[in-house]
Image (cartoon, grey):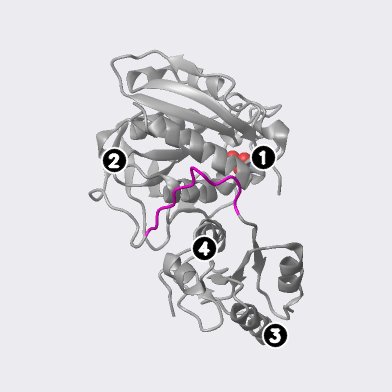
């Protein structure tokens, strides 16, 4: 799918500085979302337009940021996060990589919370430095009473500038909690307390304006790393959802439409009705990758005979892993290794 040019049109057009030369440099990459959203009324926390306010305005609204970092801002996109395409992911990751290879101590990405987990997971797999990337958003638009964005942004910049954040991969910062991008997901459609990693928990919290980590630096077990500097487009991978009476039609339609891989949000430990399972087995025999994930929202999907188990990854993260995996290999066993589930 080609990206919407108007969404990307602001990319790299400006760079602002909140001058604090004695502080570490943090690069803020704006992509939109509710944190940059505006509503007609201060009481309106759902009927608003995401991606209305420039990242420079967000930064200027929190002058306290100058106490913790010398901030530069780049507007990579300004949209609701459901419009973040794989082209924008590549643009974002390449912009982040260039900054991380320079003096920047850490990166903050402002992003809509709806798909934060996908972008953060992608950035986690492609960042090849020890430097932190922190993805931040808000559940209330910038115009709301008790908007959560300003404090989340200050915390995110503080985190990206901190020595303790190094070597922990990409993190999601919201509602005073720090989560590993690898495991953390949005679990509630409207609550401020939405980001969770049900099985793995948080990495730490903010207390008194500073990050307090519960553990020393560590990375998700078996996390692969991808160099995307030469990749111009990611292969098409789709997700379908399993339910009672499901037939294989969607699988067939996606293969016909040119998908290079499919993730199934199966029931429980990746199960589907028999007709679907049989078609997946046929696709596997032909060398077409189908990853079986779970629609339950948590847990591990084990190795399968007829497809690839998604391991710890939920369907949307499994899709990102499969897209990146397919840039390296078509081999089903090697793809299964990325999920830690070679049969
Ligand atoms: N619809 C918004 C988005 O994901 C929601 C948010 O930012 O919280 O862009």
Labels 2 and 4: the sequence-earlier one? 2
Q: Circle 1 sits in a helix, a strand or a loop, which is it?
A: loop
Region of the chain picked out in magenta, as a range: 223-234
Labels 2 and 1: the sequence-earlier one? 1
Mark 2, other Cα within 10 Å: few <14 / some 14–19 / many ≥20: many
Labels 2 and 3: the sequence-earlier one? 2
Q: Circle 4 sits in a helix, a strand or a loop, which is it?
A: loop
Tell me how far mark 2 sits from mark 4, CA to CA. 26 Å
Residue 93 percent across, percent down from the top left: 49, 40
Q: Mark 1 sits on what residue?
A: 46
Q: Mark 2 sits on what residue?
A: 166
Q: Mark 3 sits on what residue?
A: 275
Residue 63 percent across, percent down from the top left: 43, 17
Vertically, is 275 above or below 1? below
Labels 1 and 4: the sequence-earlier one? 1
Can residue 111 be seen here?
Answer: no
**Residue 314, which numbered label?**
4
């Amino acid at each position: 799918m080609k990206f919407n040019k108007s969404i990307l049109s602001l990319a790299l057009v400006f760079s602002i500085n909140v001058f604090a030369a004695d502080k570490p440099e943090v690069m803020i990459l704006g992509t939109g979302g509710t944190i940059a959203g505006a509503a007609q009324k201060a009481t309106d926390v759902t009927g608003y337009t995401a991606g209305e306010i420039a990242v420079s305005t967000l930064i200027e609204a929190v002058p306290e940021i100058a106490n913790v970092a010398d901030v530069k801002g780049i507007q990579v996109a300004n949209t609701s996060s459901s419009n973040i395409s794989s082209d924008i992911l590549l643009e974002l990751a390449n912009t982040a990589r260039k900054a991380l290879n320079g003096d920047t101590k850490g990166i903050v990405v402002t992003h809509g919370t709806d798909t934060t987990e996908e972008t953060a997971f992608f950035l986690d797999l492609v960042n090849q430095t020890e430097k932190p990337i922190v993805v931040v958003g808000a559940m209330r638009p910038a115009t709301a009473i008790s908007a959560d964005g300003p404090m989340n942004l200050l915390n995110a910049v503080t985190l990206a500038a901190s020595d303790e954040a190094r070597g922990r991969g990409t993190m999601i910062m919201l509602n005073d909690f720090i989560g590993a991008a690898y495991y953390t997901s949005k679990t509630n459609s409207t609550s401020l307390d939405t980001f969770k990693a049900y099985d793995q928990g948080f990495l730490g919290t903010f207390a008194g304006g500073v990050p307090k980590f519960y553990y020393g630096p560590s990375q998700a077990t078996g996390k692969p790393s991808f160099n995307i500097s030469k990749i111009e487009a990611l292969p098409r991978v789709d997700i379908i959802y399993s339910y009672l009476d499901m037939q294989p039609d969607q699988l067939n339609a996606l293969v016909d439409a040119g998908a290079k891989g499919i993730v199934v949000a199966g029931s429980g430990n990746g199960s589907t009705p028999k007709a679907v399972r049989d078609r997946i087995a046929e696709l596997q025999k032909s060398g077409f990758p189908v990853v079986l994930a779970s629609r339950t929202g948590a847990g591990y999907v084990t190795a399968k005979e007829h497809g690839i188990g998604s391991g710890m990854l939920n369907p949307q993260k499994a899709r990102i892993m499969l897209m990146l995996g397919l840039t390296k290999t078509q081999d089903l066993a090697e793809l299964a290794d990325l999920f830690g589930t070679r049969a």
